[in-house]
Amino acid sequence: MKKIGIIITLIICVLSNNVIAINKEDANQFVVDIGNQAIKILKIPVDDKEKRKKELQNLLQEKFDMPFIAKIILGKEIYKNTSEEKFRKFSNIFEIHIVKIYSSQLGTYKGQKFNVKNTEIKKKDAFVYSSIESPDFPNTNIVWRVRDLGEGLKVIDMQVEGVSLLRTKRNDFKMVLDSQGIDGLIMTLESMNQIPDLKIPGE
């Protein structure tokens, strides 16, 4: 009986190392920090596009689990049949793609305020509800899905007005993945990343 108890304890320890419990206060502060960093990016002059992109990339690398997000977007079947080297290449190109898109969509600072409303803990994730309030535009509601996989809190998805980043990107890439696989998607993203930057709202 003692041996069985030891085995069960070891299994629980291994499982608990994969996902660490989150408390509301930590999740709240984590998302507040993201909001503060985002506001700082908005305040960077629009003509300094490279600095905006660099700071956004730093934010993604620090606060988002980009490899995890890339893995989910590919799906289990493609991911398990992809070499580590090729997955790392896709993950890097995908990150550049996200930086390029969102650096041009963030807009400029016009008195926006970032507020965290409340947090719900559901199993292994925290869902942090927040809003961006602006004197010139309607409020934008964002829900952050936060998880700790052993390296601290990270965002694994975000919903802007109910639209999930993960779901959107999976839908965007599905046709290419189905017809051309990960190699085709890498080539597609590389081509998209060469397109000149979009005009920043407020520029």
Image (cartoon, grey):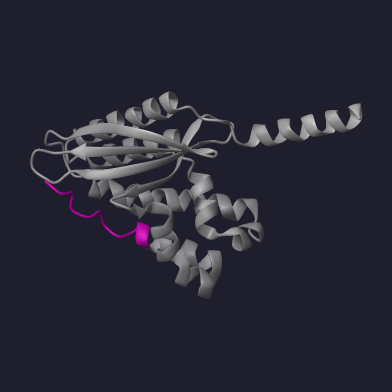
- Is residue 74 in view from this perspective? yes
Span highlighted in magenta in the image: 192-202
Q: Is the residue 3 above or below the residue 88 in the image? A: above
Q: Is the residue 180 above or below the residue 97 in the image? A: below
Which residue is pictured at 72% across the width and 30% down the height? 13
Which residue is pictured at 61% across the width and 51% down the height? 85
| Residue 197 within the segment the image draws in magenta | yes
In the image, residue 106 lies at what x, y percent? Answer: 23, 45
Give the side of residue 100 with respect to residue 68, left or right. Answer: left
Nearer to us in this view, 125 or 40: 125
Which residue is pictured at 51% across the width and 30% down the height? 22
- Is residue 203 in view from this perspective? no
In the image, residue 81 lies at what x, y percent? Answer: 66, 61
In this view, which residue lies farthest toward the front?
A: 1
Residue 113 occupies quadrant: top left
Q: Is the residue 32 above or below the residue 70 in the image? A: above
Q: Main secondary structure of the magenta part?
A: loop
Which residue is pictured at 66% across the width and 32% down the height? 17
Q: Quadrant of the N terminus?
A: top right
In the image, residue 39 lies at what x, y percent? Answer: 23, 33
Give the side of residue 95 with respect to residue 163, left or right. Answer: right
| Residue 188 within the segment the image draws in magenta | no
Give the side of residue 63 with respect to residue 1, left or right. Answer: left
Report the label total. Answer: 0
In the image, residue 143 lies at what x, y percent? Answer: 35, 43
In this view, which residue lies farthest toward the bottom?
A: 179
